[in-house]
């Protein structure tokens, strides 16, 4: 029983069978929202699916040696870790089976960006290396805030378990943490004010510059899955606890869609910042916010 | 398998990603190519995306009467685009070298160096004509699949029957 529910969660909902179409859908929503903000009609509904299939049918440049193997491996690692992160989300309450906690989810969410850094450096392209360096600097900047926000949520609710966090009613402190996570999401998903690593005008899409065909398709998919996992994390923390299974799933997806719409609107309304401005933004403006959240969480913990 | 091939053909026709290359153009055609992606013409409805890297692209859009300096770059970039690929020559310059004909700085026209699938004539062509050319190139690409391109010169010319 436990094994079947765990497998169902990993493979069906919110696992692969739900996550891959959801990833394509969110990629479409992102592009469509940008198009609508610019007064265009935008791509058709199935566009990310067509892109994916087309990329699968393209050839890849010949690569040899260890770096060639590594370049093939990075997108696969990124996709599998992002899919694992989606599978961990506790959408269906009390489903039993393998229960991951917040720390595992964070690690799996972090892995795709590590893969991007490694991919840029193993592509041996100067643009890829610049993109990877930017990604590394960016991830150091936003992760401090992101991790502090997660820790403050966990400390204020006395648990790291995702299931427990989904069931517990949200405290005011948790909302502060969710806000801090939302501030970090554009950088985590490489969206516009902070889309430095994959800047297509300046560094020819950075770490992805040498990727083609099926490998690029895997990167697109991992980006979509990151969308699902990151918005799903916020939805898990923010959505109210509902015992009805289908209603819980519906509310969960609704929350995710709202976050996607919000972030894409922000992305289309802003221009790309320089790396120093971005780092200063995270270290100076939002760090104070995160430190406030965690200190009040710890203070409340010692009081109680 | 047949279904997969059909799906692949359909996907190729509906998701042409462009790489734009300037081979000594006066910038007129480049502006028109960018204009075809703007709200007024909105080529993204056909799935068109302007990519930064030739590795990501399906269709190579070349403007300008090929200068001596550009020849090696064109060949390199053409090899960097992964197959299946198509080439669209935008403007009169890559087709005939236009008013620069007989210039000693040129080594044109473009189809001397790489196989061109679609010519979009005009100086500069209207964005509608460019979009039509890209759509035609995507259809050629989908039909051809992984087969090598035919190096015949008279392949497909886009009629610039676009009302001003």
Image (tube, helix red, strand yellow):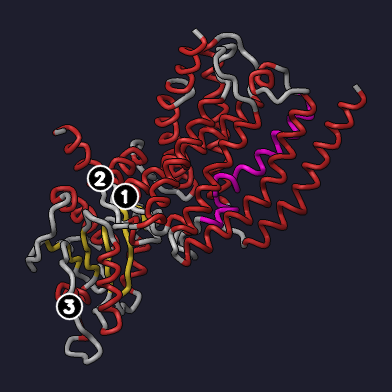
Reply above or below: A188 against A304: below
- Indicate which label's residue lies in the foreground, 2 or 3: 2
**Quarter occupied by the N terminus of chain B:** top left
Question: To which quarter of the image does residue A235 belong?
Answer: top right
**Residue at the disc numbered 2:** A57
Viewer can see residue B131: no
**Residue at the disc numbered 3:** B109
Q: Residues within 10 Å of mark 3 (few under 14, many from 20)?
A: many
Q: Residues within 10 Å of mark 1 (few under 14, many from 20)?
A: many
Magenta stretch bounds: A171-197
Chain of residue at mark 2: A
Reply above or below: A189 against B116: above
Viewer can see residue A195: yes
- Return the residue found at the far right: A303
Q: Position of residue A138 (x, y in %)?
A: 63, 53
**Residue at the disc numbered 1:** A213
């Amino acid at each position: 029983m436990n094994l079947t529910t765990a497998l169902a969660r990993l493979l069906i909902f919110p696992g692969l069978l739900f996550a891959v179409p959801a990833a394509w859908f969110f990629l479409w929503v992102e592009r469509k929202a940008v198009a609508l903000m610019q007064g265009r009609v935008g791509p058709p509904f199935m566009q990310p699916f067509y892109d994916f299939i087309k990329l699968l049918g393209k050839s890849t440049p010949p690569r040899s040696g260890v770096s060639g193997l590594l370049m093939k491996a990075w997108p696969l690692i990124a996709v599998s870790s992002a899919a694992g992160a989606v599978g961990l989300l506790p959408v269906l309450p009390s489903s039993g089976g393998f229960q991951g906690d917040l720390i595992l989810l964070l690690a799996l969410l972090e892995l795709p960006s590590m893969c991007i850094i490694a991919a840029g450096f193993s592509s041996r392209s100067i643009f890829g290396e610049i993109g990877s360096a930017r990604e590394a600097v960016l991830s150091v900047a936003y992760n401090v805030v992101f991790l502090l926000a997660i820790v403050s949520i966990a400390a204020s609710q006395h648990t790291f378990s995702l299931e427990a966090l989904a069931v517990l009613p949200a405290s005011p402190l948790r909302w502060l943490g969710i806000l801090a996570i939302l501030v970090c999401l554009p950088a985590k998903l490489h969206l516009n004010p902070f889309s430095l690593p994959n800047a297509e005008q300046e560094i020819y899409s950075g770490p992805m510059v040498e990727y083609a065909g099926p490998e690029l398709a895997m990167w697109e998919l991992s980006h979509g899955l990151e969308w699902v996992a990151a918005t799903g994390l916020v939805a898990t923390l923010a959505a109210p606890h509902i015992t009805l299974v289908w209603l819980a799933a519906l509310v969960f997806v609704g929350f995710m869609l709202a976050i996607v719409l919000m972030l894409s609107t922000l992305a289309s309304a802003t221009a790309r910042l320089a790396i120093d401005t971005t780092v200063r933004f995270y270290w100076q403006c939002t760090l104070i916010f995160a430190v406030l959240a965690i200190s009040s969480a710890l203070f409340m913990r010692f009081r109680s | 398998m047949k279904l997969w091939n059909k799906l692949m053909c359909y996907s190729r026709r509906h998701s042409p990603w462009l790489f734009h290359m300037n081979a000594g153009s006066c910038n007129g055609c480049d502006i028109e190519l960018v204009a075809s992606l703007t709200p007024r013409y909105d080529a993204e409805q056909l799935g068109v995306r302007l990519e930064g890297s030739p590795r990501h692209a399906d269709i190579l859009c070349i403007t300008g009467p090929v200068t001596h300096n550009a020849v090696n770059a064109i060949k390199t970039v053409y090899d960097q685009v992964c197959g299946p690929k198509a080439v669209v020559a935008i403007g009169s310059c890559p087709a005939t070298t236009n008013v620069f004909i007989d210039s000693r700085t040129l080594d044109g026209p473009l189809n001397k160096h790489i196989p061109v699938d679609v010519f979009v004539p005009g100086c500069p062509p209207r964005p509608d004509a460019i979009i039509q050319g890209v759509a035609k190139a995507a259809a050629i690409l989908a039909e051809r699949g992984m087969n090598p391109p035919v190096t015949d010169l008279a392949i497909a010319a886009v009629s610039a029957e676009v009302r001003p």
